[in-house]
């Protein structure tokens, strides 16, 4: 089973994502801030990380930068999910090697699952 880490501070969004990915046979880990998310990522080495940008304690871009400093983390698969759609945030995330940058209001959960499976090379 592929392992997914959701780093999201909004409980309802995290729960919807958890339920959907568990129904798709993923092992789901959850964190509600970047600080905890970074620790969980380095300890559990998930196959892919869904990362929010605006969070308490440590924002997503800071977590991403710190993740990329780690030997394992520099190649970790990350998809950014956020309400931010400004160019600077997108540019910073892409520079730190995210697979995709999705604005929450623009995506449907089925499309997100498809994108994650595609990135992991899983059958649709």
Image (spheres, rainbow, N blue to C red):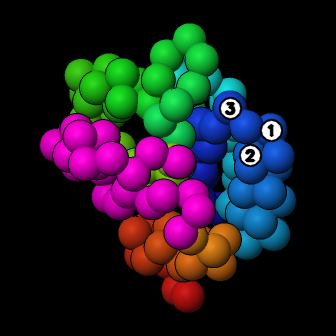
Mark 1 sits on what residue? 11
Q: Is residue 70 visible?
A: no
Q: Specify the label residue 55 is tagged with.
A: none
Which quarter of the rendered picture does the N terminus lie within? bottom right
Which quarter of the rendered picture does the C terminus lie within? bottom right
Contact between marks 2 and 1 (CB within 8 A): the answer is: yes
Mark 2 sits on what residue? 14
Q: Camera-side residue: 110 or 82?
A: 82
Question: Was residue 85 drawn as part of the magenta stretch in this picture?
Answer: yes
Contact between marks 2 and 3 (CB within 8 A): the answer is: yes
State the residue at coordinates (62%, 43%): 6
Classify residue 39 as left or right of residue 21. left
| Residue found farthest to the front | 86
Other residues around mark 2 within 10 Å, as few (<14) / some (14–19) / many (≥20): some
* Position of residue 67 measured from the top left corner of the image (x, y, whole percent): 34, 27
Which range of residues does the magenta coloring cover? 83-106
């Amino acid at each position: 089973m592929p392992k997914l880490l959701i780093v999201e501070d909004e409980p309802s969004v995290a729960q919807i994502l958890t339920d959907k990915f568990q129904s798709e046979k993923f092992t789901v880990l959850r964190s509600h801030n970047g600080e905890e998310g970074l620790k969980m990522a380095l300890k559990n080495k998930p196959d892919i990380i869904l990362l929010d940008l605006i969070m308490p304690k440590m924002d997503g871009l800071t977590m991403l930068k710190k993740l990329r400093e780690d030997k394992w983390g520099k190649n970790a698969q990350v998809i950014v999910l956020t309400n931010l759609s400004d160019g600077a945030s997108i540019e910073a995330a892409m520079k730190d090697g995210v697979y995709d940058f999705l604005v929450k209001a623009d995506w449907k959960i089925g499309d997100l699952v498809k994108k994650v499976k595609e990135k992991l090379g899983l059958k649709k």
